[in-house]
C-alpha cells in the first residue's frame, strides 16, 4: 500500500489477510488528510471504500475522519412518508456555484415554500468535471465536485436544523464505465448471468464480500452523513436470486443505521413491482415507496397530446388520471403493448402515500423533445390545473428542481467523459432518444446537445431570479402546498375516501369524503369550457346541510390565470377551460 501525504511516506506497506477476502494494515503516523493507494501487481489503484477522492476516481484516496464533524441534529426524527413533499435536485445544476455551500443557502426558501424532503441525485464520485452521477464508481466517496465530505455533512445539518429531511439517490444496479477498479481486486464483483443495459451486472449471488460492499454502503450514508433515507435507482436491474434478496438486506441495513429515526426507502422500478414495498414476511422487500410512472405518463399525454414510445400505452384521458390516484399503477399485470409483455403487479391495496407522483423528474425532462420543461410543451392553464391535481392528490408529490417557479432552464443529459468514451456516450444518447419517432428525424438528432460539452451542463443551471419573474406560478405552488398541509381532509392522504367521476375525456371531478359532511371537491378541466345545466352525478351533490365554497382556483389572476366565474357544482355547472377548482363543504347559510 504506497502512501503519501503530510508525513514522510513509509513506502509500500504489505497488507495481511483477515480472511473472507479482507486485508488490512496499520500505518503509523498517518491521519486525516493523508493520501494513499493500493498496489496490486503492477497496478496502483484507489481504495474501493475510499471516503474521499480529491483528484477524482483515478487519483489517490484521502483519509477522512468521519468523527471530526460536530453535528447539531441529534433530535431530528428522520423522514416520515406521510405528509412528505419531495424535491429532487442535482447539486451541480441547482445553483450557479454548484456546491453544497451554495445549495444550503437556498434551503430556508424551500422550507418556507412547503418542501419537507430533499432528494439528492447521486453523489458517489465519478470521472470528469460534471455529470448526472449515475455512472459513479467510488460508492463511499461523495463527489469532490461539490465540496469536501464535511461540506456535505454541513449541508445536511443545516437542512435538519430547518426541519428538512434529506435522502440520497444511490445506484446499486451498475457501475460507471471509467474509474471502476473493482475488477483489479476481484472479477467476482460482476457476473455474466444477467443482462444489464448500462454495463456489467453486479454479482449479488457471489462471494459474501461482494454483497456486503453494497449493503454496507446503504448504511454508511445514513450512519456517517445522517441521510434520512435512500432512493434506489432502477431496481429492476438489481438481479439476485438469493433469499433474502439483496434489496431486503439493503433496506434492513439502512434502517439499522438510522438508530431509531424514520428512514425513507424509495424505489424506482420500471416494471412497477409492488412487491418491493410489501413486508418481507409477505414475500416482499420491505421498502417504503415506489415511483409511479403510470401517473406521469397519463398526465404527460393529457398535457401534450403526444403518445410516442413508452407513452403509447396511455391515452391521457380523465379515467386514467382518476384511476392512478385511486388505485395506484394503471398497469397491474395487464399486457403492455410497448414492451409486448405484461407489466406491473397487483397494487390495489397500497397506501396512497407509498406512491410518489410527479410531472417532472431528471429523466423525463431530459427525454422530452428539446429537453424542455412542461411549460414549453403545454398551455399555461393546463399546467396550472395539472399542478393543482399533483399537489392535492393523496399520493406523495415530488417536484423537480425549478418546477416550483416554472423554471425556463432545460435539463439535458450531461456527462464529462474522457475523449475515448465521449463520442460513444453521445451516440448512445441519440439512439435512446430515437425510440421517440419525432426525435429520430435527422433534424431532431442534430439538435441533441453533446453530453460532454460543458455548455450543455451550464444551460441546466437554475436562475433563481425567476422566483420573481415567474412569481404568479410560484405563489400558486406555495398556496397549494399550504392547502395540502393545513386542510385536514387533504392531509389525510386517504385514497379509500376518495372517489372520482368522469365528465368527459378531458374533465373530471374528485370527491374527498370528510367526517360528518366535511367533504372536499376538486374539478379538473383540461379541455374547453363546459356549461352543464344538468349533470347526473351524485359526487357533485352538496352534503346535507352544507354548501360548496370555492377555496382555490388555478385560474385566479394571482396565479397567472384569466379569472373565472366561480362555478356552482350542485346547480348549473360552469367549468372554465384549462382550469382546476377546489371546494370545501361549509355549513349552509339559513334561508
Image: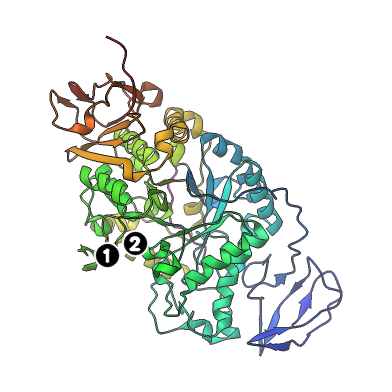
Question: Compared to 423, does 487 lie above or below?
Answer: above
Tag 2 near tag 1, CB within 8 Å: yes
What number is the disc on residue 272?
Answer: 2
Q: Residue at x 24, y 21 (%)?
A: 568
Task: Tell me residue 320's x, y (percent).
Answer: 23, 48
For the N terminus, the quadrant is bottom right
Most extreme residue toward the top, as rendered? Answer: 591
Q: Is residue 423 visible?
A: no
Task: Tell me residue 583's x, y (percent).
Answer: 33, 27
What number is the disc on residue 335?
Answer: none
Name the residue nearer the viewer: 573 or 366.
Answer: 573
Question: Compared to 359, does 480 lie above or below?
Answer: above
Q: Residue at x 65, y 58 (%)?
A: 225
Task: Tell me residue 8's x, y (percent).
Answer: 86, 75
Q: Quadrant of residue 168?
A: bottom right
Q: Earlier in the sequence, mark 2 or mark 1?
A: 2
Magenta span covers which residues? 409-417
Name the residue nearer the viewer: 568 or 227.
Answer: 568
Task: Tell me residue 290's x, y (percent).
Answer: 41, 57
Q: Main secondary structure of the magenta part?
A: loop
Q: CA distance from mark 2 to mark 1?
A: 7 Å
What number is the disc on residue 343?
Answer: 1
Q: Is residue 332 left or right of residue 489?
A: left
Within 10 angstroms of label 2, few (less than 14), some, or many (20 or more) residues?
Answer: many
Within 10 angstroms of label 1, few (less than 14), some, or many (20 or more) residues?
Answer: some
Element at label 2: loop
Amino acid at each position: 500500500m504506497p502512501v503519501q501525504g503530510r508525513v514522510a511516506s513509509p513506502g509500500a506497506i504489505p497488507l495481511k489477510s483477515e480472511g473472507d477476502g479482507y486485508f488490512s494494515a496499520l500505518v503509523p503516523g498517518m491521519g486525516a488528510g493523508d493520501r494513499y493507494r493500493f498496489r496490486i501487481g503492477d497496478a496502483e489503484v484507489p481504495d474501493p471504500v475510499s471516503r474521499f477522492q480529491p483528484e477524482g476516481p483515478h487519483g489517490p484516496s484521502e483519509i477522512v475522519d468521519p468523527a471530526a464533524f460536530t453535528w447539531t441534529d441529534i433530535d431530528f426524527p428522520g423522514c416520515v412518508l406521510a405528509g412528505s413533499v419531495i424535491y429532487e435536485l442535482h447539486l451541480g445544476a441547482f445553483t450557479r456555484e454548484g456546491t453544497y455551500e451554495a445549495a444550503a443557502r437556498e434551503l430556508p426558501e424551500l422550507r418556507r415554500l412547503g418542501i419537507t424532503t430533499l432528494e439528492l441525485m447521486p453523489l458517489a464520485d465519478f470521472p470528469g468535471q460534471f455529470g448526472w452521477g449515475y455512472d459513479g464508481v467510488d460508492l463511499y466517496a461523495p463527489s469532490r465536485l461539490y465540496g469536501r465530505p464535511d461540506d456535505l455533512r454541513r449541508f445536511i445539518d443545516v437542512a435538519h436544523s430547518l426541519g428538512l429531511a434529506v435522502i440520497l439517490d444511490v445506484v446499486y444496479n451498475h457501475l460507471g464505465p471509467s474509474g471502476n477498479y473493482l475488477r483489479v481486486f476481484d472479477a467476482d464483483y460482476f457476473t455474466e448471468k444477467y443482462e444489464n443495459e448500462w454495463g456489467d451486472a453486479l454479482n449479488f449471488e457471489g462471494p459474501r464480500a461482494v454483497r456486503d460492499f453494497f449493503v454496507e454502503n446503504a448504511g454508511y450514508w445514513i450512519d456517517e452523513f445522517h441521510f434520512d433515507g435512500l432512493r434506489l435507482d432502477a431496481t429492476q436491474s438489481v438481479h439476485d436470486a438469493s433469499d433474502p434478496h439483496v434489496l431486503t438486506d439493503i433496506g434492513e441495513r439502512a434502517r439499522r443505521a438510522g438508530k431509531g429515526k424514520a428512514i425513507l426507502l424509495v424505489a424506482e422500478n420500471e416494471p412497477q413491482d409492488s412487491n418491493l414495498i410489501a413486508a418481507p414476511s409477505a414475500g416482499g422487500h420491505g421498502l417504503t415507496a415506489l415511483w409511479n410512472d403510470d401517473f406521469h405518463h397519463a398526465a404527460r399525454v393529457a398535457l401534450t397530446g403526444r403518445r410516442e414510445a413508452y407513452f403509447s400505452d396511455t391515452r391521457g384521458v380523465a379515467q386514467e388520471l382518476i384511476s392512478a390516484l385511486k388505485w395506484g399503477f394503471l398497469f397491474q399485470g395487464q399486457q403492455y403493448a410497448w414492451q409486448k409483455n405484461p407489466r406491473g403487479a397487483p397494487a390495489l391495496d397500497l397506501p396512497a402515500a407509498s406512491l410518489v407522483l410527479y410531472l417532472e423528474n431528471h429523466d423525463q425532462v431530459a427525454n422530452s423533445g428539446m429537453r424542455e420543461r412542461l411549460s414549453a410543451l403545454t398551455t399555461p392553464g393546463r399546467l396550472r390545473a395539472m399542478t393543482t391535481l399533483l399537489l392535492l392528490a393523496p399520493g406523495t408529490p415530488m417536484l423537480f428542481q425549478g418546477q416550483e417557479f416554472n423554471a425556463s432552464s432545460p435539463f439535458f443529459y450531461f456527462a464529462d467523459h474522457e475523449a475515448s468514451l465521449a463520442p460513444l456516450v453521445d451516440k448512445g444518447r441519440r439512439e435512446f432518444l430515437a425510440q421517440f419517432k419525432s426525435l429520430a428525424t435527422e433534424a431532431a438528432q442534430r439538435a441533441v446537445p453533446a453530453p460532454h460539452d460543458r455548455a450543455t451542463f451550464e444551460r441546466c443551471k437554475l436562475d433563481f431570479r425567476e422566483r420573481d419573474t415567474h412569481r404568479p406560478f410560484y405563489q400558486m405552488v406555495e398556496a397549494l402546498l399550504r392547502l395540502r398541509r393545513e386542510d385536514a381532509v387533504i392531509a389525510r392522504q386517504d385514497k379509500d375516501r376518495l372517489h372520482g367521476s368522469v365528465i368527459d375525456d378531458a374533465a373530471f371531478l374528485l370527491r374527498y369524503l370528510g367526517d360528518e359532511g366535511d367533504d372536499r371537491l376538486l374539478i379538473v378541466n383540461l379541455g374547453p369550457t363546459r356549461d352543464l345545466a344538468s349533470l347526473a352525478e351524485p359526487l357533485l351533490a352538496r352534503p346535507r346541510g352544507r354548501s360548496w365554497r370555492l377555496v382555490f382556483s388555478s385560474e385566479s389572476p394571482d396565479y397567472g390565470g384569466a379569472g373565472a366565474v366561480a362555478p356552482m357544482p350542485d346547480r348549473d355547472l360552469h367549468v372554465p377551460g384549462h382550469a382546476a377548482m377546489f371546494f370545501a363543504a361549509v355549513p349552509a347559510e339559513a334561508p
